[in-house]
Amino acid sequence: MISQEKDPGTPATPDAPVGTSRAHPVTLREVAEAAGVSTATVSLVINKKKNARIAEETRERVKTAIRTLGYRPNAMAKTLVSGTSKFIGLVADGVATTPFAGQIIHGAQDEAWKHGYALLIANTEGNLDLENDAINMMLEYKVRGILYSTWFHRTTDIPETLREADFVLVNCFSPVPGAARAVVPDEAQGGQSATEILIRGGHRRIAFINATTPAPARDGRLEGYRAALEAAGIAFDPDLVLEAYPDQEGGYGATAELLKRGVSAVYCYNDRMAMGLYDGLREQGLSIPGDIAVVGFDNQEVIAAHLRPPLSTVSLPHYELGAAGVRLLLGLDEAPVDSALKIECPAIERASVAVPSKA
Amino acid sequence: MISQEKDPGTPATPDAPVGTSRAHPVTLREVAEAAGVSTATVSLVINKKKNARIAEETRERVKTAIRTLGYRPNAMAKTLVSGTSKFIGLVADGVATTPFAGQIIHGAQDEAWKHGYALLIANTEGNLDLENDAINMMLEYKVRGILYSTWFHRTTDIPETLREADFVLVNCFSPVPGAARAVVPDEAQGGQSATEILIRGGHRRIAFINATTPAPARDGRLEGYRAALEAAGIAFDPDLVLEAYPDQEGGYGATAELLKRGVSAVYCYNDRMAMGLYDGLREQGLSIPGDIAVVGFDNQEVIAAHLRPPLSTVSLPHYELGAAGVRLLLGLDEAPVDSALKIECPAIERASVAVPSKA
DNA sequence: ATGAAAGCGCTAACAT
DNA sequence: ATGTTAGCGCTTTCAT
């Protein structure tokens, strides 16, 4: 029973593109009626099906009707038919909260978009109930898959519900090897790059102020430091590895101990620490990089680029983590079988390390 | 034709919730069959319809079937029927890119979630084609409405496509009064609060280093400065208003000029400027707040909280902007008819302004 | 208290 | 080259 006879000849506004009226969305059926063809034909035209031969004249008629009526496809209906949506979910424990980790969202969004997917995000602030609700919601919306991300690099448990979806861990990994695809920053390579900046600057006695807080970053950044020294034929001296809480206060507080070591350069666990160290060194009347060269880690733009002198550091590739997560999910990139895919942490050289004269 | 006889008694894993298998999503019809009722009944149970009287026994049977089968509703099908989804779109020209503006996403997400909506985001990086595609996509997904946001407070044109949706401008506004609902930070109040911190600190000769770049912030922050002075009975002295490019260099570079004015306190257009000024003052051997008290604007956490001394400033309420945008969209908050809804910029007092002794 | 059936907007065989 | 038709999974009268 067709409810009421349609009256396609007399739209509210004569020929201006309607649909701008938010009354009753124009449907494919209406387009078909207006163009005097079947819905199937309209569908074929819209989806530019290759092997569907439609008369050029018909095609035009349909296109005109679409334009005149201001038709807009209903993605929900489409999805219902196909069974899977063009959504990718991003569950974050705080990336939206944290300034620089927000780039994970950005990278995921760009990459998803590139492949025709839209990003559905949920910030759970670490709340497990919220997290569960979020995953359920995404599942109900038949997302193509879920990116499960953390705002700092760490291990994570995999929520039961998450397993119902195709998923990828971003900036975190399962303690169980091979339990899930994952993408993380290459901390060791980053630590090595950071140290190499100093070595290239001609330094041999290089201190490392590591964090006191256990984390993959803590291990990896130390590992990279040692690797760089070894590659340069510099003996590792445990005395040159200090530890402090990884923030400004920590860096500031480590100044005295550091100076006792008689080093010419310091690699700090992160930029915030380096920022504190700047203050400490300045108080001692020491100049950077003249007396002491400094490199950080993280490339927290607001800090690193704007300290005086600007801080050499190593970048946490948040954007790339998000993008790579999407590629892993869509099967465009291959993930290592037993471990996480490691993304390079690029070195950013600035004025806190002097370039040796080419003599 | 029911494909194969279901065998609800023998799921792969005896009694654990199934559905964990990602084979063929369980449908409502299957639940109905398993429970020996009609789909209508299952629907009623699931949606806890008030006026539907279902026998307690039946209800239980349905619930059990749902659990056993690991049923999960298909949100797409639901939406198809209802005509409108539980999505709110967020179109951003760069909030995901910019560290602190990311809070807009966060606020919008939290508030949307609170009302049962999920956030669909698109970062357009200012690219108009991308923007258009994003809006179209959202329209196709039948979003409840769209938040159109900018990473810094400014005027904006309203894209044609956007008008097809219910929308709210966030952190931006139309030059045409009454053209659209909008929510922006209250720059004038912020400027006034910033200045008041200094006044309460006992200062009378207070400089303002404004930005050279035209923006609502530039006008509003100056307006607030004047309002605060007037309220305190301090005559406005145009000589005390300097201008510089709103970054570190600008602040650093303004130091000399500033010192000529013989002021005891400075209110900077933003935190980055204040950061540069710190360096400038320190070079002159001046201490903060002893010799000069400083306040900033924006509360860029990484900068403000961690300078030495920590910087008093005024917070840009990004989180609240996002949240208020959602409330405006859903009609939960009333928007002023002819102008944007202004959100308070709360003062954050730190050690860069000394508290006068209560003598 | 529950079931039957229509239909949301679209796609994809299958006809013609 | 185009039309007919049967669903996709769900909600919602309307019967019973």
Image (cartoon, coloured by chain):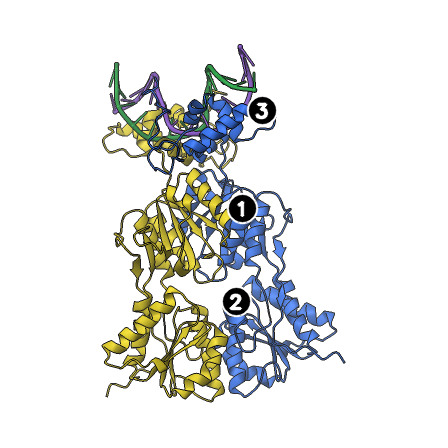
Chain colours: A blue, B yellow, C purple, D green
Tell me the subunit letter for badge 1.
A
For residue A176, say whether it is visible: no
Q: For this view, does A134 lie left or right of residue A253?
A: left
Dot 3 crowding, Cα within 10 Å, few <14, some 14–19, many 20+: few
Q: Which residue is mark 1?
A: A112
Q: For this view, does B152 lie left or right of residue A209?
A: left
Question: Three-letter amino acid code at disc 1?
Answer: Ala
Tell me the subunit letter for badge 2.
A
Question: Three-letter amino acid code at disc 3?
Answer: Ala
Q: Which residue is mark 2?
A: A300
| Proximity of marks 3 and 2: CB atoms separated by less than 8 Å | no
Q: Nearer the viewer, residue B87 or B44?
A: B87
Looking at the image, the residue that sits furthest to the right is A359
Position of A263 relative to B30 (above/below):
below
Q: Which residue is mark 3?
A: A52
Q: Position of residue B127 (x, y in %)?
A: 51, 52
Q: Quadrant of residue B139?
A: top left
Q: Earlier in the sequence, mark 3 or mark 2?
A: 3
| Alpha-carbon span between mark 3 and mark 2 | 53 Å
Residue at the image position 51 percent from the left and 40 percent from the top: A144
Q: Nearer the viewer, residue A256 or B158?
A: B158
